Image (cartoon, rainbow, N blue to C red):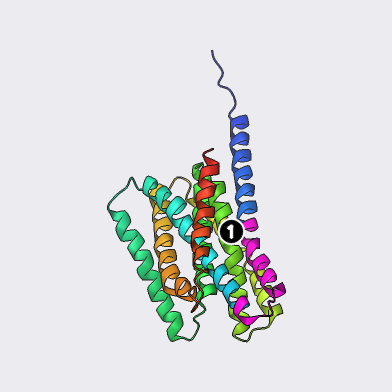
Amino acid sequence: MRVSAPTYPVQINVAKTFMHGMLNIILLTAAAGACIPIGGFIASQTRIQRQWLDEEFRHSVIALGAGILLGAVAIVLVPDALKHLSHSPWTIALILSGGVFFYCLEKYLDIHRRSAPQLTGMLLDYVPESLALGGIAASGADSTMLLAVLIGLQNLPEGFNAYKELTDAGHSSKKVLLMMLALLPLGPLFGVAGFSALGDQHEILGGIMLIASGGILYLIFQDIAPQIPIRKHRSPPLGAVIGFSIAMLGVVLSQY
């Protein structure tokens, strides 16, 4: 009579694998989130005496963040979402619904005098991207590390610009930096939620990624891109090209 082997070692290995993946996603999202206060701290230490040069530098950083956001959408979020949803025609409706949702949210914030484009954009893309990052990690996709790096890279200029935006509105430097530090747990929290719940929910994960993509595209062209041009200065928009190139470089290196 054959005696079946005990299942305990298998269960232990599965639990270890799950905990290892959970730890990885916590570390990745925390590192990406840490770039927000780091960007704010850099902004607090950056003082250029000539006003026109300071303004041009700031607009260049805004363009850099917009370029990386666009790269994350075009190179990671949308292609992965299309795979999860088998290139269904409904994907167009999802990405459009993301833009409409963010439009309604921005309109609400504007009516209630709470409009802060850089801060709003930073939060509204960081949260769903962390959720998607957790789901992508659980599904075992190769783009996990690339998306984490892109989130961190975009959080640096966004943290920089959000700091400038809030301090220009009258908030103290210390208060702004403390608020940015308080945002750190959001990434791991939503990353763990995505890792736990979305790993095998491909349709839901793809839908979240497309809605986030639509919202990010709306924010880029509604709030961020209009801040980039400066009269008589045409170099800042090159930051968008540089940012997109950084995202593209990540894909090239991951396939090398």
Q: Residue furthest top?
A: 1
Please name the residue shown 39% across and 57% down the image: 210
Helix, strand or loop at mark 1: helix
Residue 165: in magenta span: no
Residue 101 versus residue 37: which sits nearer the camera? 37
In what quadrant of the picture does the N terminus appear? top right
Residue beneath disc 1: 153
Dot 1 surroundings within 10 Å: few (below 14), some, or many (20 or more)? many
The relative height of residue 143 versus residue 162 in the rendered view (above or below) is above
**Residue 189 seen from this side:** no
Q: Quadrant of residue 39?
A: bottom right
Which span of residues is magenta-colored? 30-53
The percent coordinates of residue 32 (x first, y second) are 61, 58
**Residue 30 seen from this side:** yes
The percent coordinates of residue 44 (x first, y second) are 70, 74
Residue 192 versus residue 11: which sits nearer the camera? 192
Q: Identify the amino acid type marked 1.
A: Leu
Query: Overall secondary structure of the magenta stretch?
Result: helix
Please name the residue shown 37% across and 49% down the image: 82
